[in-house]
Image (tube, grey):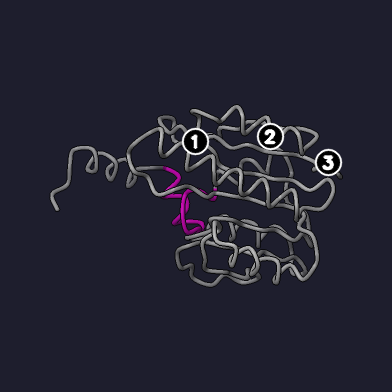
Amino acid sequence: MKRTRTSKSWMSEHISDVFVKQAKKDGYRSRAAYKLIEIDEKYNLFKKNMIVVDLGSAPGSWSQVAANKIGIKGKVIALDLLEMEPIKKVEFIQGDFRDNKSLIEIEKQLKNLKADLVISDMAPNISGIKVVDQSAAIYLNELALDFSCNWLKPNGNLLVKSFIGADFDSFVDSVKSSFKKVIRIKPSSSRGRSSEIFVLGLEKINT
């Protein structure tokens, strides 16, 4: 298939991207690692011995960051529809988070314990139709929020990738109803032209 000018431009940008180069140097599987690292440096999300659930984990850079931060007694439970190469201290489940079977598998891995932190880098397959893609993204956000309300410890935290557009403000309001503080974050490692934005819910309200 012949490459379009857009795809050629993206590839050129990707190859020259400073975060892509740094990821290769540091051994991270994608540049997305630096988004999580930057947010953690500012808000101190990770602590030793935490239980972390990583939704939409493939290729695994967020799981790599989490596993490095939580120490030998911590645990990361990761889920993605795609395959993911093994990572030490990470229990990976291949499945669709929209499928109840995947939720049951995560619950089995939790072994009746609650998570300290839920991180979600989930995004839908892009159709190119903005309204459809935005709706699908917000749906995944809502699933991550619902999971967090059920499986986070009191005062646990949620970090979820979202996209600016229809229903985004409504989703943020939903997070505000379950967490004491909600912050919108655009990391410096996030490409400027991208509409992605991260929503951080701090200190889950015990209901």
Three-letter amino acid code of the residue under disc 1: Glu
Q: Which residue is mark 2?
A: 174
Quarter of image, res 52: bottom right
Give me the residue at 74% from left, 67% from top.
110
Give me the residue at 50% from left, 38% from top.
189
Q: Look at the image and say whether residue 26 sits in the magenta stretch.
A: yes
Is 47 in front, or is 140?
140
Q: Which residue is mark 1?
A: 196
- Which numbered disc, 1 or 2, marks the residue that appears first in the sequence? 2
The magenta segment is 18-33
Q: Which numbered disc covers residue 205?
A: 3
Quarter of image, res 67: bottom right
Q: Look at the image and say whether residue 39 sits in the magenta stretch.
A: no
Quarter of image, res 168: top right
Check disc 2 and report its element: helix, strand or loop.
Answer: helix
Distance from label 3 to label 1 (Cα)?
A: 26 Å
**Can you say whether 183 is above or below 147 in the image?**
above
Three-letter amino acid code of the residue under disc 3: Ile
Is 175 in front, or is 24?
175
- Left/right placement of residue 190 relative to residue 177 reads left
Is 203 in front, or is 45?
203
